[in-house]
Amino acid sequence: MDQSRPTRAHSHSHVSLSLSLSTLSLSKPPMDSNSMAKRPKPPSDHFNMDALLTSFLSLSDSPSIHTSFDRLIQSTASDSDQNRLIQRALRLGSLLLDAANRSARRCSSDHNAVVWPLSPDLTIKIFSMLDTQSVCYVAATCSFFQKCAMDPSCFANIDLATLVPKVNNAVVSTMIHRAGDALMSIRLGVLPIVPAPPFFSSQPLVYSIRNANDASGFSWNDKKSRQGKDSSILTRSCLNSLSGNGGAPGFGVHLRRLHLYNIERMDNASLLTSLSACPSLVDLEIVGLHVELRHTLESISRNCPLIERLVFESSKTGRDDGLKFPTCNEFVHNCPNITTLALKGFKLHDYKARMLVKGLRRLKHLDLSTSYSFTGAFLKNVSGNGGGGGDNLEVMILRDCMHLKEIEVERFMAAVLAGEFKLLRYLDISNREGLACEGDWSNRCYNASFIPIQQLLEQRPDFCLVAEFPKGSYNDNDQMIGSDVSLASQSSSSHTFDGSSTSDGSYNSDHGSGNEYGRESGFTIYEENSDYLMS
């Protein structure tokens, strides 16, 4: 018992000595930066600090530290000195805690680098397969993962598209600079509230049909805005990092895919500047941007000759009527590799649609949904002996096209039954406003009984037809069972279609509609003259 008491007394004095030394070291007047630069700490000071920390850390956790500190406070004369001592103790404890946390992270990182079973190269390869957000999460885990995640290949495919605005120009610029020359794709902007399935993605198409009675109301003049209230967080300069400085190639020189959604402030000039910096682009998707079709196609024609997939959805359905005949001609000749073309919500006359479909000889997937003006007559002479792009069509979507005529759909289906469009396997002619009747597009037709389902099944068993109309449904159960052909329309029918009546001619011969075609040709000449006068 007698031998243990001096030990406690020695411990108490040791704690008091340590705190006193710390207090004294903190009470020294600070030195200016110049004097510190000229007079570095001598090695003896580092040794004394190391010895002091070693002695302090060798103490066991016990209530005696609290008691000793209380005595030290009580021995101080004034309240101001007591407060100063307490603040110094807090500061010293905070510094020691920060140093301990930093060392713990360093030790954990070194431990991870040792026990992690994969080499840095394989780790970087795995991280490069993650989406952008996951890469950022991984980088925050430890310094070892952070070093791996900072490799440019981990940011080669930047995906910053969100349902609500979350990123700004600085974030986009940082990601692009991290990727550098390894940049391959960018997906950016505010996604639609109800995201549509990927258009002609690598996933197999799933054809399922439902009764259109449960479809929500639709108005041609009522298109919900897809911009978020704070979408201006991304501005017209969000892709400036793609362009080089002083004529040098920018980071967009190897970019292959660019998807932009509802970037409210991006205009024609900023988009065209970005496209001019992406000569290797093969996949472009534009949804909800306030840019014009004409200027965009002209820029693609000049700067993106390798383009294969173009999806362009207008932000102002039915009001973009700026596309000119020379623009179509230039686009067809300068971008021959197009296999997927979607122009949704634009004013597109038949002769312009015909030039695009017939001129793009590798075209496989066509989507003109919600577009205006064309009647369907553009499908004449795009297949058969003409050798046009219609010969390779596999998927065609003409959904909710306001001026699409029933008679043109009937003639097209006759051409399919006559052996044209041999590769076509999917056709969507659904229309919530009904098909336009001959002679008066305001008179709508809600039936599709003119399509001979049984004959179509016999000749094209792999063909999928989607025809959804809002007023009732027409289902021939005997013909529909076990088939991939789906039809929903009104049960009453004013049109009948006899498959045998189409075996004598070809769709290219226009089936006796030469007067209508002549009127369209005359209109084409008149409108083109107007285009040249206004341009």
Image (cartoon, grey):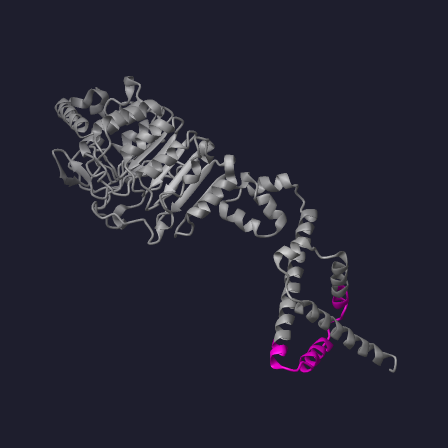
Residue 484 in sight here: no
Q: Nearer the viewer, residue 519 or 322?
A: 322
Residue 2 in the figure: left or right of residue 377: right
Quadrant for residue 413, please give it: top left
In front of the other: 165 or 386 = 165
What residue appears at the point 24 percent right and 22 percent down from the top-left corner? 381
Rendered location of residue 107, percent (x, y): 69, 54
* Principal secondary structure, stretch drawn in magenta: helix
In the picture shown, does residue 526 fall above or below 99? above
- Residue at 19%, 26% in the rendered image: 532
- Say if 409 sits above or below 37 in the image: above
**Left or right of 387 in this view: 84:** right
Depicted 490 relative to depicted 379: above or below: below
Q: Could you tell me which quadrant the C terminus lies in?
A: top left
Q: Is residue 63 magenta?
A: yes
Q: How many marks?
A: 0
Front position in the image: 46 or 342: 46
Magenta part of the protein: which range?
Answer: 54-83
**Residue 82 figure quarter:** bottom right
Percent of width and height locating residue 384: 28, 20
- Report which quarter residue 253 is drawn in: top left
Coordinates of residue 314 in the picture (x, y in percent): 28, 40
Quarter of the image for the N terminus: give it: bottom right
Q: Residue at x 76, y 62 (%)?
A: 48
Decide if residue 252 is on the left or right side of residue 40.
left
Residue 157 inside the magenta-drawn segment: no
